């Protein structure tokens, strides 16, 4: 089964902004693509063959720990 991952123009624009703040974002997106190629139906089913997947950014968690710690 061929899985197509399509990034919207809005997503790309916002990802460029977030990439400056969260250095692991690009690596996290690559791992998400790899995960989706293995299991394309993960996430919340929106109907019509579309799924919503949340991405946990690794560097965001570390930043919270540093602020709290």
Image (cartoon, helix red, strand yellow):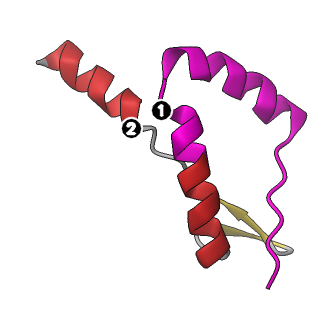
Left/right of residue 43 with respect to residue 2 in the rendered view: left
Residue pointed to by mark 1: 24
Q: Residue at x 52, y 44 (%)?
A: 28
Question: Which residue sits furthest bottom?
Answer: 1
Q: Which mark is residue 14?
A: none
Residue pointed to by mark 2: 58
Q: Check if mark 2's residue and mark 1's residue have beta carbons within 8 Å.
A: yes
Q: Residue at x 53, y 41 (%)?
A: 27
Residue 15: x and y, percent?
68, 28
Residue 47: x and y, percent?
80, 73
Distance between mark 2 and mark 1 Cα atoms = 6 Å
| Above/below status of 66 relative to 58 | above
Left/right of residue 65 with respect to residue 30 in the rendered view: left
Res 44 seen here: yes
Q: Any magenta on residue 19? A: yes
Q: Any magenta on residue 14? A: yes
Q: Secondary structure at mark 1?
A: loop
Res 43 seen here: no
- Main SS of the magenta segment? helix
Q: Residues within 10 Å of mark 1 (few under 14, many from 20)?
A: some
Front tag of 2 and 1 = 1
Q: Residue at x 11, y 18 (%)?
A: 69
Q: Residues within 10 Å of mark 2 (few under 14, many from 20)?
A: some
Q: Which region of the structure is painted magenta? A: 1-29
| Above/below status of 7 relative to 23 | below
Locate the N terminus and report the quarter of the image it occupies.
Answer: bottom right
Q: Nearer the viewer, residue 41 or 44?
A: 41
Residue 14: x and y, percent?
72, 24
**Res 8 quadrant in image:** top right
Q: Secondary structure at mark 2?
A: helix
**Res 13 quadrant in image:** top right
């Amino acid at each position: 089964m061929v899985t197509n991952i399509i990034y919207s123009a809005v997503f790309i624009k916002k990802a460029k902004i977030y990439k400056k703040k969260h250095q692991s974002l690009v690596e996290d997106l690559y791992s998400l693509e790899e995960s989706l190629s293995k299991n394309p139906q993960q996430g919340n089913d929106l109907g019509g063959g579309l799924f919503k997947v949340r991405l946990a950014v690794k560097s965001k968690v570390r930043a919270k720990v540093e602020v709290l710690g």
